[in-house]
Image: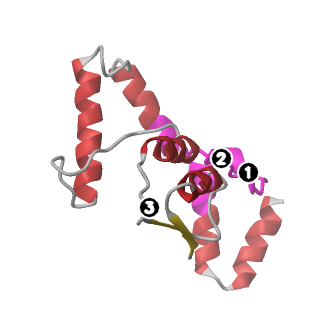
Amino acid sequence: REAALDQCLLTSGSGYDRAVEEEKREDFPQLSGVVYLDYAGAGVYSRALLAQAQSQYLQQLQCNPHTSPQAEARLEDARSAVLSFFGASRDTHAVVFTSGSTDALRLIAERYHFSDSGIFAYSDVNHTSVVGLRQRAQQRAQVATV
């Protein structure tokens, strides 16, 4: 099977395909002979990611930031990096980490105070969790699809 793939890549004339397949073989050995289509919020982990995570777990105690000054410092560093990336200030913005998009959208729906004069705009193509947020917004704001 690998030989057939190599032959296909050799005859396709595309260096990109070969580079992608070589990286896949090296960094994603668990995908050997597999076509992975089911992302569902759980990305395929790479060899490099596993090595980095293992190193961190072996070198640092991973615990609740409320009980560890080191963990709290790492959390605040991550918040600062996000704010810096967006050119935002702690004076005007807050960074809240959630378990994923569904949890983030639930928090927005529960805590954001939509106003009668506001407009909630969302894409026709989006995460299914937007439906709950849209329903909450419809109670107060105008809703528009983009």
Instruction: Tell me which amino acid carries mark 1.
Output: Ser
Query: How many C-alpha atoms fall within 10 Å of the one at disc 3: few (<14), some, or many (≥20)?
Result: few
Which mark sits nearer the N-terminus, 3 or 2?
Answer: 2
Numbered disc total: 3
Q: Badges 2 and 1: C-beta atoms under 8 Å apart?
A: yes
Q: Quadrant of the N terminus?
A: bottom right
Task: Tell me if label 3 and label 2 are in contact, CB under 8 Å.
Answer: no
First to last magenta residue range: 22-51
Tell which circle, 3 or 1, labels the residue nearer the N-terminal end.
1
The location of residue 39, given as percent across then percent down, is 68, 52
Q: Which residue is mark 1?
A: 32
Above/below status of 54 relative to 68: below
- Distance between mark 3 and mark 2 Cα atoms: 53 Å
Secondary structure beneath label 2: helix
Q: Is residue 25 magenta?
A: yes
Label 2 packing within 10 angstroms: few (<14), some (14-19), many (20+) = few
Residue 51 at what x, y percent from top left?
47, 36
The residue under the point 23% across, 39% down is 77
Tell me the SS state at disc 3: loop
Residue type indicated by callout 2: Pro
**Residue type of the residue flagged with mark 3:** Asp
Q: Residue furthest top?
A: 67
The crowding category of the residue bearing disc 1, from other C-alpha atoms within 10 Å (few below 14, some 14 to 19, many at least 20), is: few
Residue on which disc 3 sits = 116
